[in-house]
Image: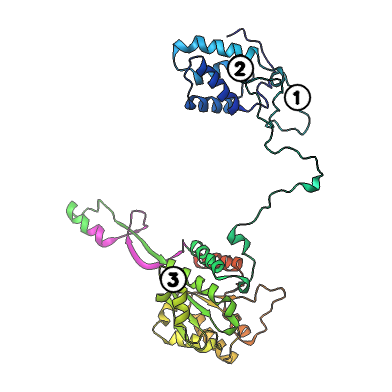
């Protein structure tokens, strides 16, 4: 086939390679060459990887891809010569594209091209678009409306505007956000080949087998455990709109990490066991029923003092304490400041989630919030889906490092 004439670099430009390959394979099958779907796929991939710029290149690409037996070469040559002898000249001698035109836009099919007869050409281009142009004005055209995902569409809406099914989406997203909880280094050590310290006792014990020569040195590394988290959620009347969403946050930590979670209004209620239920709906229902003073008054200082005095107070030591509340408190601000000082000395970090903090021009003018803020490492807004997801990431950063990101 060395006698094929050279063509311009625009060979097969604007041609639908898949339609071209399928039609050529169909013509070969009628001539007795068994070109299957796998061969057609190889041919299409070869045309995409190395677009032919000469007829000889196209010939060898098609021959290597579609012919499997030497006895089929004569039939292949006849079909290839018949096809390209009748090919329309437009795609093969097409001039350079005008400025701004795309090379992957397919050309329209010529009206006088017959692709069904035995001697006709191949479908050099894709059929016209399925949606024809209308004769009306551009104002009549309507593009499909792009809508956000279910969670993204609810990201910036306040909790009081959401339904229960929409709030349930938050629980799944929060559990995914805290799936990989950071660890902390403990004072215990365990044997490990990557450790830096030499474990003396195991090394000496093994040296007994080699005449007290430490041939095998055993190393040890520090044991790492997940950073403990203690979460307290305000479920008083002023937090009615955010209570269910905050319970989902508590459940995410109770399920994923070894956290202790509490709810408080006028008294403190431990919800760790209730929120670890396999069903999120049942867990939230049990937690809501377990709080006897839900949607009542607020006594933040009294409840924090009760936590530190209980046997769960040791869980606060070295833990990240998260308090979700708007700061409204019926206890005197001095009492809240005193108990926050005690909590600050015992905890690793204190993070306050305030649903009002995201409002424009927010300032902690509430007496309880103003008294507690100096003892907090950071106060984060938590009034929307996006705020709670960002707060979960911030908690991850607080636990990972000694500073805040």
Nearer-the-camera pick, 283 or 356 = 283
Other-residue count near label 2 (Cα within 10 Å), few / some / many at <14 / 14–19 / ≥20:
few
Image quadrant of residue 273?
A: bottom left
Residue that label 2 marks: 117
Q: Position of residue 319 (x, y in %)?
A: 46, 74
Nearer-the-camera pick, 402 or 81 = 81
* Outermost residue toward the bottom in this view: 332
Q: Position of residue 216 (x, y in %)?
A: 26, 52
Point out the image quarter for the C terminus.
bottom right
Q: Secondary structure at mark 2?
A: loop
The label on residue 254 is 3
Image point (21%, 55%), residue name: 207
Give the vertical position of 336 relative to 129 (above or below): below
Q: Nearer the viewer, mark 2 or mark 3?
A: 2
Q: Nearer the viewer, mark 1 or mark 2?
A: 2
Between marks 1 and 2, how big is the CA–CA gap? 31 Å
Image point (55%, 69%), residue name: 167
Give the vertical position of 70 relative to 250 (above or below): above
Residue that label 1 marks: 96
Q: Earlier in the sequence, mark 1 or mark 2?
A: 1
| Residue 39 falls left or right of residue 361 | left
| Residue 355 falls left or right of residue 283 | right
Image point (43%, 68%), residue name: 279
Between marks 2 and 3, how big is the CA–CA gap? 72 Å
Q: Which residues are magenta?
A: 179-204
Residue 165 lies within the magenta run: no
């Amino acid at each position: 086939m060395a006698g094929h004439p050279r063509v311009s670099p625009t060979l097969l430009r604007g041609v639908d390679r898949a339609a071209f390959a399928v039609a050529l394979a169909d013509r070969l099958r009628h001539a007795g060459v068994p070109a299957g779907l796998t061969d057609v796929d190889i041919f299409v991939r070869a045309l995409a990887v190395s677009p032919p710029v000469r007829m000889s290149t196209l010939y060898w690409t098609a021959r290597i891809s579609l012919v499997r037996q030497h006895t089929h070469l004569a039939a292949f040559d006849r079909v290839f010569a018949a096809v390209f002898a009748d090919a329309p000249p437009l795609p093969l001698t097409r001039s350079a594209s005008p400025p701004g035109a795309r090379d992957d836009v397919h050309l329209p099919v010529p009206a006088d091209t017959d692709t069904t007869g035995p001697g006709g050409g191949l479908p050099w281009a894709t059929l016209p678009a399925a949606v024809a142009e209308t004769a009306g004005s551009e104002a009549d055209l309507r593009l499909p409306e792009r809508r956000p995902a279910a969670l993204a569409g609810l990201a910036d809406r306040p909790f009081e505007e959401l339904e229960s099914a929409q709030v349930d989406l938050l629980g799944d997203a929060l559990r995914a956000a805290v799936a990989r909880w950071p660890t902390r280094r403990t004072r215990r050590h365990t044997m490990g080949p990557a450790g830096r310290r030499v474990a003396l006792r195991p090394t000496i014990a093994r040296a007994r087998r080699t005449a007290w020569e430490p041939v095998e040195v055993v190393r040890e590394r520090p044991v790492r455990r997940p950073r403990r988290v203690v979460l307290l959620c305000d479920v008083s009347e002023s937090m009615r709109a955010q209570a269910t969403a905050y319970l989902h946050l508590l459940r995410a930590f109770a399920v994923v990490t070894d956290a202790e979670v509490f709810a408080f209004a006028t008294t403190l209620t431990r919800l760790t066991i209730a929120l670890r239920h396999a069903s999120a709906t049942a867990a939230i229902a049990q937690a809501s029923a377990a709080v006897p003073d839900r949607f009542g008054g607020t006594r933040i200082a009294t409840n924090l003092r009760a936590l530190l005095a209980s046997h769960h107070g040791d869980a606060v030591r070295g833990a990240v304490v998260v308090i979700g509340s708007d700061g409204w408190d019926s206890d005197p601000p001095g009492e809240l400041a005193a108990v926050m000082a005690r909590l600050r000395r015992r905890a690793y970090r204190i993070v306050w989630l305030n649903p009002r903090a995201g409002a424009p021009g927010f300032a902690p003018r509430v007496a309880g919030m103003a008294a507690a803020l100096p003892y907090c490492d950071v106060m984060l807004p938590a009034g929307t889906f996006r705020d709670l997801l960002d707060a979960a990431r911030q908690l991850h950063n607080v636990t990972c490092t000694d500073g805040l990101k």
